[in-house]
């Protein structure tokens, strides 16, 4: 009986060890300020996120696969249309409304027409999130036990 118990304990310990090895590992994190509104993965481990601070000021942050910011700007009533490792595309109502295109060197192109508002597809009351890619996924860590609750965007690598 004692031998069977020892074998069972060894088997369970081995299974737990294998599961730990297969578990996702945290790679990096970025401050989401008071609230993360949208996350769109770029397909290579980076992403763009729309966030708000405690004063309800919206900003967009685009980070590479190492969590290093490539672009950051204040936005207003904005949402991310697409994100890849080569470009970020988002709609922004700040200063009259336009679609903003940013390349991976940080060069910004504002797409607009005089006396019009250019924006992405309708129906973005609740913008879509793309929080996975082939290499891993993103999670939002809630910090609730502090004077000012906040969120942190966390990148996890599959393994």
Image: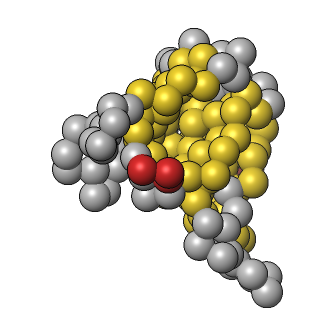
Residue 143: percent from the left, percent from the top?
71, 71
Q: Identify the residue shown where x is 54% and y is 23%.
A: 109
Residue 96 lies left or right of residue 86; in this view the side is left
Q: Nearer the viewer, residue 154 or 116?
A: 116
Which residue is at the far front? Answer: 114
Q: Identify the residue shown where x is 66% and y is 20%.
A: 107
Q: Quadrant of the C terminus?
A: top right
Residue 101: percent from the left, percent from the top?
50, 25
Answer above or below: position of 151 versus 21: below
Residue 21 lies left or right of residue 56; in this view the side is right
Q: Is residue 84 visible?
A: yes
The quarter of the displayed image where residue 148 is located: bottom right
Q: Identify the residue shown where x is 38% and y is 32%.
A: 112
Q: Nearer the viewer, residue 105 or 126?
A: 105
The quarter of the displayed image where residue 67 is located: top right
Residue 113: percent from the left, percent from the top?
33, 32
Q: Nearer the viewer, residue 28 or 108?
A: 108
The number of numbered discs placed on residues in the rendered structure image is: 0
Residue 70 lies left or right of residue 90; in this view the side is right
Q: Is residue 22 visible?
A: no
Answer above or below: position of 7 versus 143: above
Residue 118: percent from the left, percent from the top?
31, 38
Q: Identify the residue shown where x is 78% and y is 26%.
A: 66
Answer above or below: position of 156 versus 2: above
């Amino acid at each position: 009986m004692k031998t069977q118990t020892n074998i069972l304990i060894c088997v369970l310990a081995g299974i737990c060890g294998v599961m730990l090895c297969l578990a996702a590992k945290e790679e990096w994190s970025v401050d989401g300020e008071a609230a993360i509104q949208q996350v769109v993965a770029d397909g290579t481990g980076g992403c763009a996120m729309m966030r708000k601070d405690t004063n309800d000021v919206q900003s967009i942050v685009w980070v590479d696969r190492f969590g290093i910011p490539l672009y950051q700007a204040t936005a207003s009533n904005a949402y991310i249309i697409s994100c890849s490792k080569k470009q970020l595309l988002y709609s922004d109502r700040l200063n009259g409304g336009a679609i903003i295109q940013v390349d991976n060197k940080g060069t910004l192109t504002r797409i607009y027409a005089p006396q019009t508002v250019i924006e992405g597809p309708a129906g973005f009351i609740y913008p879509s999130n793309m929080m996975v890619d082939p290499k891993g996924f993103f999670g939002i860590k809630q910090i609730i036990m502090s004077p000012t609750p906040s969120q942190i965007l966390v990148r996890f690598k599959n393994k």
